[in-house]
Image (cartoon, helix red, strand yellow):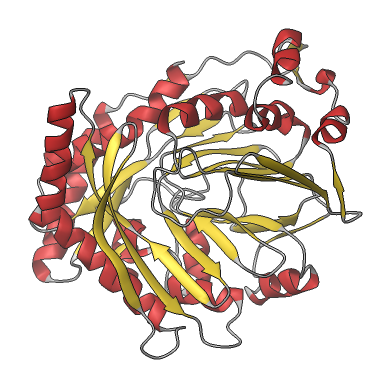
Amino acid sequence: MKPVFSVEEVQKSRETGLLEQLCLISNHFERFSLLHTGTHAGAAPHRFDLLAGLGSIDGFDLHGNTSLDAIDEFLAQHKGKFIFGHLNYELKDRIEQGLLSRHPETNSFTPAGFFVPEYVVKQENGRIEILHQSTGQLISEEEFLSRYPGDIFSDNSAETPIQSQDQHYLEAAYFKATEKLFAHLRRGDIYEVNYCLPFAARGQLKNPASTWLKMQSHQQAPFAALYRQKNAWLLCCSPERFLCKKNNRLLSQPIKGTAARDPEEGKDELQKTMLQSSEKERAENIMIVDLVRNDLGRIAERGSVRVDELGAIYSFPRIHQMISTVSSQLKKNVRFTDILKATFPMGSMTGAPKIRAMQIIDEQELFRRGIYSGSVGYIDPNGDFDFNVVIRSIIADEQRNEIYFPAGSAITVHCDPKAEFNECLLKARGMQDALQE
């Protein structure tokens, strides 16, 4: 039996931050969600530095022909508690008639899953609060950590070296697909489509939490998540928010527009300026902003949809991103699944028009996206919520011995396919580096 964390690491963890301590005990829970806001490099608002749900008092997973209404029933049953969960991209097939994914499953995440955690851990401005939801009592950090001795960090699975795939066939497939996408664009079937590649590896991550911790330390993503559902792990360092609800205000922050950082300050500033002034990137961003405005308008009070910020540039350790903010006031008596039916999947990961873009995506892409292009987040006791866009992620399935780290980019009639392919490589690099380490 090989220890995932050494005794020295366990002892040292008591001297490090809460983030590392939670990673140390993540292997103990079959349902686990750790949300982290990095160094707040992304667009506001942020309501915590760290929020985690550990263990499960009760859970719900969408299977078979189960109606979406069952999600609302589960949420109503546990109203007043913290609930964490995920949404797979293929949830679209239940939202829009006529959509059907032709590819086989790539991981064990259910189409949608939610759980009421036994423990909720929150850190905000240095203040730590730990809630034991079974009793409704707050407990100290020391008491919480004492319940999980170091011997749980053991793993008796066989050593499986991680072997990356040959990427040459992905490059060939990319240019073959873009030829067909351009034909759709020229005919006016779509104006923009997000095409993704399934970068992958074979093997098993011996310690997903440690790998994610390295990824997040490098990327400092504002919507990062370490998420587990039994044998499936999501190691997410996302810069993008899907939806945030606060009282009756709904907010979305789509990303379209990417530029690599440069180690030289002057050149890096030039990269940022070029992204800001790029007509192509701004046009792509505006297309998705219009789509998001339309989605939010379906469930908004009349006249309340507005663009709070258009095409702002935010800088992360590896890349610059163009981010817009769109908000609205919700109509009364709108359920959680009503919001999903109006807005999911997020336009930044589909294209416009959304339904036709999703049909073409399924025709041309090489894989079933699963939780990639989906969302992970939480619902608080007041019914407010915050969900990310699952990008810049490693998806590892312990049972299947498969690892995916997809990446994509927006294709429009004016884009350069070679430049877009290089953008995919740029986005995948952070995950590749983490796997190599």
Query: Which residue is pictured at 71% across the width and 33% down the height?
Result: 26
Q: Is residue 87 left or right of residue 422?
A: right
Q: Quadrant of the N terminus?
A: top right
Q: Residue 202 at what x, y percent from top left?
A: 49, 25
Question: Which of the 4 quarters of the picture holds residue 248?
Answer: bottom right
Q: Is residue 291 left or right of residue 340?
A: left
Camera-side residue: 211 or 414? 211
Question: Which of the 4 quarters of the picture holds residue 238?
Answer: top left
Camera-side residue: 179 or 68? 68
Q: Residue 34 at what x, y percent from top left?
A: 63, 42
Query: Which residue is pictured at 23% across the width and 44% down the height?
Result: 258
Query: Which residue is pictured at 62% across the width and 23% down the height?
Result: 207
Relative to 375, does residue 154 appear above or below in the rendering? above
Q: Does residue 401 show up?
A: yes
Relative to 323, does residue 16 appear above or below in the rendering? above
Determine the residue located farthest toward the bottom in the rendered image.
302
Q: Residue 224 at what x, y percent from top left?
A: 51, 42
Q: Is residue 52 left or right of residue 294?
A: right
Determine the residue located farthest toward the right in the rendered image.
135
Q: Does residue 353 show up?
A: no
Relative to 221, does residue 249 appear above or below in the rendering? below
* Number of marks: 0
Query: Which residue is pictured at 57% across the width and 44% down the height?
Result: 49
